[in-house]
Image (tube, helix red, strand yellow):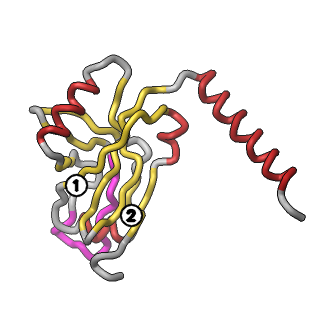
Amino acid sequence: MPKGDGGLITQNRKARHEYTVLDTVEAGIVLHGTEIKSIRNHRINLKDGYAGIRNNEIWLYNVHISPFDEGNRFNHDPVRTRKLLLHRKQIDRLIGEVKQSGITLVPLKVYIKNGVAKVLLGLAKGKKQYDKRETIKRREQERRIEREYKPR
């Protein structure tokens, strides 16, 4: 794979179902050793991941990056906490937003951009159960309409 190319590695489909995404922010990830090789092999899981604030910095929690197969003693802890790289103004804005009640930072996608691993964070508000049902109902209606009007 060329260094400049790479594209989408993984995305968190569950996040769009569980949360209403209000805004998104692109952040770099501080990786150790063989973690980038595992990410390039699509060995990353965002399902239970979230971002939080510690010491006026943004950190990524519960994101599982599998150990690299040929990594031997240089391998990493799969679910370690990883620092996210953002500009100070972005961090300050996110801290202000997260301090509002019910707002959280959720990783939506991980991708490679110009040879560097990036995570797309979503500023999200949790959905209630009836909101989730409404979303499913709307999606099914759209599928039904698409099927009806599909040219034969």
Instruction: Tell me what residue is drawn at x 21 percent, y 32 percent.
Output: 93
Whichever of callouts 2 and 1 sits on the residue coming sooner in the sequence is: 1
Characterize the magenta stretch by its predominant secondary structure. loop
Residue hosting label 2: 43
| Mark seen at residue 123 | none
Amino acid marked by disc 1: Gly
Chain part drawn in magenta: 63-75
SS state under label 2: loop
Quadrant (top left/top right/bottom left/bottom right) for the N terminus: bottom left
Q: Position of residue 96 (x, y in %)?
A: 22, 25
Quadrant for residue 151, please give it.
bottom right
Residue 8 coordinates in the image, percent (x, y): 42, 63
On whether residue 69 falls in the magenta region, the answer is: yes
Amino acid identity at mark 2? Arg
Work out whether 122 lies above or below 102.
below
Please name the residue shown 40% across and 32% down the image: 124
